[in-house]
């Protein structure tokens, strides 16, 4: 089949009818074939009429011709099937090929058989079968090509043919008396008709499509058809018989020519195709080289301007470009095998990356801006596009990401946004400042000469918007509003400020729209160009009129205050009290007046005037009561009025009276405390003395009462006796019953004597401490000896032993007093303490506590009951009625002891007797005695 | 003179023997039937009342005449002791003293004395006083 045919076939497949040029060689072949067939038919017709009688039987030649034709037919059939298979032949080629196969196989069998029934039958079957197969071309291509059914028919015919060789009875009778039967003739004619119909169809197709093959097969089919028709006229081995065999052989040759032609065409086509391929390959190679170069360029550009990376499905980096390494600071080796967390800056939340991952794992590309962190810790922003890569089976094989460094853009955006915000904030602040400010604002452009005044500026001067414009506001107009007294000063100051010589800040008066002047404070600043020339002068105007009035008022009050303060200072100086002021009770600092210092013996300011100092000067016993009093005063209780001791400079504590007032704040908390300090030491001393004297007096009163009581009883008792018995005696004398007269008069006499004794004792007692000799050093040994000598009679009577134990030999006192003590005590001991023979009385003196000397007299008598131990030292108290004493001796001893700062008491001896003790110190006057008693009590 | 069948036993507690003599003289002159026992101090008085030696054989007195100014144990202490002793507290005690001191009187009544009498100077008055004590406590008064 030719290239042209192939092209046509292609065109036909595309349903585009196209006439194609037919090769010249082909046309020659076709024409020659047509001519040859036509001549053969004509000759056949011509000779068939005359040569019917001649017969030439040559079986081998026949077999050779038939088998050669069959082989050619098979070869052509194979070639046709092949070209169809390759797509170069239309569907109708199939029945033609199978027809050729059917005929070729049966003809081979025919060639192999000997002349006879079977011989004719196989030829006939080949003719009818081939004709039938060729006639299939009448059917449309789509029917023909379905399920390859012509192939099955082909096989069936062949099988049937072979079968008849084994079972001859299946075939109809072909010969009868050496002549073909009518069945044979009919079948051959029928086959020929089918061939001719097929030829016509093929020719029509050729006319329609112009495909040379159709024409060739039309001639081929016509030849077979002609040969079949000629069968009627022939008999075995006659001329006609050989003729139509030749015609058939020619048809096979024609088909062979077609096969050769087809092969040649295919070879040519293949050659051209190879050339085309080569050319296409060359073109493609060139294109690929160009593409490669372009890609190289792109890659370089990419490295320069973009970051590129590839990861596997797990997100591990498999490739990065130079740009990636450069920006991230990591080397390629450090990045390969890692995932992108290496450069995670922590700026984005986890959800951000989860969203990226979710997008790209679903096969969608992701684009966005990511903040990453380089190896050195710096942050950088990238515009990132991540594209999933797919393998041939459609699965994601990895991800490619392309990033662009947008760090600088981001930074610029950030700065821009911040700047915008700041600007907006400043504008807002400015607007609010202008609106909210009570200050008027003004701005003068010194170059252009324009001026601007805020609404508040106008309002401060009492102008409305309109009226102010009528004023034609200008520096000149403003100068006219200035108070005449201020004008020169202000204008000069403004000039200086504009010239940059000073800050513009001045107070002046402006005339308002009401015609009155108000005080204002103007502040401003200038803007200067590079040459130092002022370009703008702007500032604010504050109404300070009220402030000025208050200032004036304050100054006036301050003056009054100063006057008052001076008066106060004069008063403070004039008073004897020290003044102190604790201005802030939270603070340690105080203020003390000079007199305060001098009261403490210090010069003014010599010691720090603080609470701490004050506390340190307080007497330790007075600290807590004083602080308690302060607390009470703080709480608003009793006013502070406390007497305490303070240590003066000399170290001596003196009594002071502190009085103070506490000032509270609005919340009721103490804020300030101030008061005075008054020296009450002498007063206090006098009070103490008075107190002592009072106690003294009370004691004396008590003593007097006791004395009076004792006197009233003990002096009255004899009087009762005397008066009672005297009246009795009088009665007795009157009645003459005088038997008891002497007895009663004796009683009167004893009572009178007892009374005299009492009086004497009282006198003696009163003498103690009143009539005194000057104290002198008394030798106790001498006194003790004298006493023992005086009592020799009693000692002898009691047969007592008196011992003397002197640990102290001397004592400073009135000798009469020591004698009185010893007389009483020793006398008592001999009288009451010597219950048995040779009783011992021990008299002695020894040192006692507080530097006193103790005199003691111990006896071995019955002792003194504890219940009477105190009473026996009272006046006129006697334990033993039989005693001759008046009960005043021990009272005298006690009183002497008191006089010498000591005391007298009685204890029980271990042995059972009594032990009278007297302690003596230095003699005192009467008040001293009381004081000493008081001290002992304490 | 008041005569009555009933006789009284007085205990006189008096340290001054002259005063005791005056009381006993007056008592004898008033009514001989009355008995009178005399002790000189407080401790002896309590022993007597409790019939402790040496007074175990003595009768219990119907009344006590008590001086306040006594040695060892004064009259007030004796009075308190008597009035606090359930076996003695019913015995009337008449304080007979020279003291006209207000505190002494208050103390004596507070301690439970039945009467407080100041010793008169004149024997006649003394006599009357004793007679009236006798009359009041023997004729008119009813003891438990």
Image (cartoon, coloured by chain):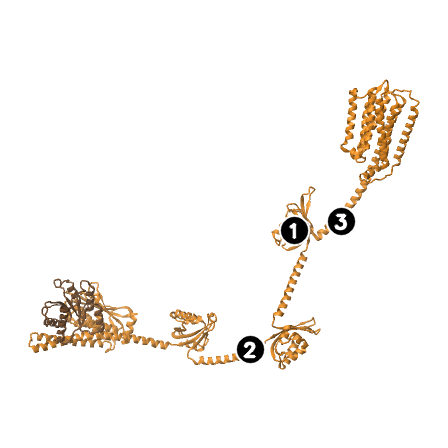
Distance Cα–Cα, label 2 vs label 1: 73 Å
Q: Which residue is mark 2?
A: A551
**Mark 3 or 2, nearer chain start:** 3
Q: Secondary structure under badge 3?
A: helix
Q: Is residue A110 above or below residue A598?
A: above
Q: Quadrant of the C terminus of chain A?
A: bottom left
Q: Position of residue A614 (x, y in %)?
A: 43, 72
Residue A895's mark? none
Q: Hue of chain B?
A: brown
Q: Which residue is mark 1?
A: A330
Q: Nearer the viewer, mark 1 or mark 3?
A: 3
Q: Hue of chain A?
A: orange
- Residue A805 visible in the snapshot: no
Q: Nearer the viewer, mark 2 or mark 1?
A: 2
Relative side of B35 to A629, left or right: left
Mark 2 crowdedness (10 Å alpha carbons): few <14, some 14-19, many ≥20: few
Q: Quadrant of the N terminus of chain A?
A: top right
Mark 1 crowdedness (10 Å alpha carbons): few <14, some 14-19, many ≥20: some
């Amino acid at each position: 089949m030719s290239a042209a045919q192939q092209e046509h076939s292609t065109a036909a497949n595309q349903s585009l009818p196209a006439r194609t040029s037919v090769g010249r060689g082909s046309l020659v072949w076709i024409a020659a074939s047509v001519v040859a067939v036509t001549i053969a038919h004509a000759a056949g017709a011509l000779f068939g009429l005359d040569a019917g009688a001649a017969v030439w039987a040559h079986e081998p030649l026949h077999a050779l011709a038939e088998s050669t034709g069959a082989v050619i037919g098979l070869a052509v059939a194979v070639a046709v099937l092949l070209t169809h298979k390759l797509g170069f032949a239309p569907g109708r080629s199939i029945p033609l090929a199978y027809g050729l196969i059917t005929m070729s196989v049966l003809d081979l069998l025919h060639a192999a058989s000997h002349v006879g029934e079977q011989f004719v039958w196989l030829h006939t079957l080949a003719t009818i079968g081939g004709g039938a197969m060729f006639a299939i071309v009448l059917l449309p291509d789509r029917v023909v090509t379905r399920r390859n059914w012509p192939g099955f028919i082909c096989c069936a015919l062949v099988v049937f043919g072979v079968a008849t060789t084994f079972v001859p009875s299946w075939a109809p009778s072909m010969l009868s008396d050496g002549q073909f039967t009518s069945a044979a003739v009919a079948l051959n004619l029928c086959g020929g008709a089918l061939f001719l119909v097929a030829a016509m169809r093929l020719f029509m197709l050729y006319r329609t499509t112009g495909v040379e093959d159709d024409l060739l097969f039309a001639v081929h089919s016509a030849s077979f058809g002609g040969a079949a028709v000629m069968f009627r006229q022939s008999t075995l081995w006659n001329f006609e018989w050989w003729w139509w065999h030749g015609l058939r052989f020619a048809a096979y040759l024609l088909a062979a020519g077609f096969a050769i032609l087809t092969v040649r065409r295919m070879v040519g086509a293949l050659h051209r195709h190879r050339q085309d391929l080569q050319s296409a390959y060359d073109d493609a190679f060139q294109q690929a080289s160009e593409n490669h170069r372009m890609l190289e360029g792109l890659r370089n550009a990419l490295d320069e301007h973009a970051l590129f990376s590839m990861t596997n499905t797990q997100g591990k980096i498999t490739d990065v470009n130079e740009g990636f390494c450069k920006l991230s600071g990591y080397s390629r080796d450090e990045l390969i095998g890692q995932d992108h967390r290496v450069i995670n800056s922590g700026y984005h939340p986890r959800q951000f990356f989860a969203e990226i991952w979710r997008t790209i794992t679903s096969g969608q590309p992701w684009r966005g801006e990511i903040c990453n962190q380089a190896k050195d810790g710096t942050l950088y922003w990238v515009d990132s596009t991540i594209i999933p890569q797919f393998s041939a089976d459609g699965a994601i094989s990895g991800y490619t990401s392309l990033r662009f460094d947008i760090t600088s853009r981001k930074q610029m955006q950030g700065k821009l946004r911040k700047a915008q915000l700041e600007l907006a904030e400043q504008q807002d602040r400015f607007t609010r400042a202008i609106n909210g400010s009570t200050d008027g604002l003004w701005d003068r452009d010194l170059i252009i000469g324009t001026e601007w005044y805020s609404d508040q500026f106008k309002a401060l001067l009492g102008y409305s918007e309109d009226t102010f414009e009528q004023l034609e506001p200008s520096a000149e107009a403003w100068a006219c509003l200035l108070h005449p007294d201020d004008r020169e000063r202000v204008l000069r100051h403004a000039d200086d400020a504009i010239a940059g010589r000073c800050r513009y800040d001045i107070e002046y008066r402006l005339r308002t729209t009401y015609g009155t002047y108000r005080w204002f404070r103007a502040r401003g600043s200038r803007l200067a160009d590079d040459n130092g020339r002022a370009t703008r002068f702007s500032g604010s105007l504050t109404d300070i009129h009220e402030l000025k009035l208050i200032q004036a008022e304050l100054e006036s009050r301050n003056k009054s205050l100063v006057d008052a303060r001076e008066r106060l200072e004069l008063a403070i100086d004039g008073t004897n009290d020290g003044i102190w002021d604790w201005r802030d009770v939270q603070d340690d600092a105080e203020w003390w007046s000079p007199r305060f210092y001098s009261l403490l013996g210090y010069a003014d300011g010599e010691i720090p005037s603080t609470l701490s100092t004050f506390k340190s000067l307080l007497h330790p016993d007075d600290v807590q009561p004083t602080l308690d009093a302060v607390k009470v005063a703080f709480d608003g209780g009793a006013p502070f009025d406390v007497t305490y001791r303070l240590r003066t400079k000399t170290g001596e504590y003196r009594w002071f009276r502190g009085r103070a007032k506490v000032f509270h704040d609005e919340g009721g908390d103490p804020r300030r405390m101030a008061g005075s300090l008054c020296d009450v030491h002498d007063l206090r001393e006098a009070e103490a003395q008075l107190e002592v004297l009072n106690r003294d007096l009370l004691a004396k009163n008590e003593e007097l009462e006791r004395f009076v009581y004792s006197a009233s009883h003990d002096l009255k008792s004899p009087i009762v006796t005397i008066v009672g018995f005297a009246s009795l005696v009088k009665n007795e004398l009157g009645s003459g019953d005088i038997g008891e007269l002497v007895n009663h008069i004796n009683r009167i006499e004893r009572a009178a004597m007892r009374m005299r004794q009492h009086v004497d004792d009282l006198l003696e007692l009163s003498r103690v401490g009143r009539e005194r000799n000057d104290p002198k050093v008394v030798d106790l040994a001498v006194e003790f000896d004298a006493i023992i000598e005086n009592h020799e009679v009693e000692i002898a009577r009691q047969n007592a032993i008196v011992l003397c134990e002197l640990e102290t030999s001397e004592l400073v006192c009135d000798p009469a007093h020591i004698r009185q003590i010893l007389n009483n005590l020793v006398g008592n001991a001999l009288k009451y303490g010597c219950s048995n023979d040779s009783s011992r009385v021990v008299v002695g003196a020894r040192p006692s506590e507080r530097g006193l000397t103790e005199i003691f007299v111990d006896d071995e008598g019955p002792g003194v009951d504890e219940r009477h131990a105190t009473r026996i030292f009272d006046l006129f108290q006697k334990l033993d009625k039989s005693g001759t004493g008046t009960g005043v001796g021990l009272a005298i001893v006690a009183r002497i002891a008191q006089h010498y700062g000591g005391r007298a008491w009685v204890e029980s001896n271990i042995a059972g007797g009594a032990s009278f003790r007297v302690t003596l110190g230095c003699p005192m006057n009467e008040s001293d005695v009381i004081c000493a008693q008081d001290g002992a009590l304490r | 003179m008041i005569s009555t069948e009933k006789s009284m036993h007085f205990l006189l507690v008096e340290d001054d023997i002259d005063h005791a003599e005056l009381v006993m003289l007056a008592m004898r002159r008033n009514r001989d039937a009355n008995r009178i026992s005399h002790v000189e101090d407080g401790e002896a008085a309590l022993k007597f009342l409790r019939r402790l030696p040496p007074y175990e054989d003595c009768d219990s007195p119907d009344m006590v005449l008590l001086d306040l100014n006594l040695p060892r144990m004064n009259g007030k202490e004796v009075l308190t002791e008597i009035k606090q002793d359930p076996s003695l507290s019913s015995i009337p005690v008449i304080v007979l003293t020279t003291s006209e001191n207000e505190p002494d009187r208050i103390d004596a009544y507070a301690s439970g004395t039945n009467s407080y009498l100041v010793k008169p100077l004149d024997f006649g008055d003394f006599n009357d006083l004793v007679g009236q004590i006798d009359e009041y406590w023997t004729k008119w008064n009813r003891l438990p």
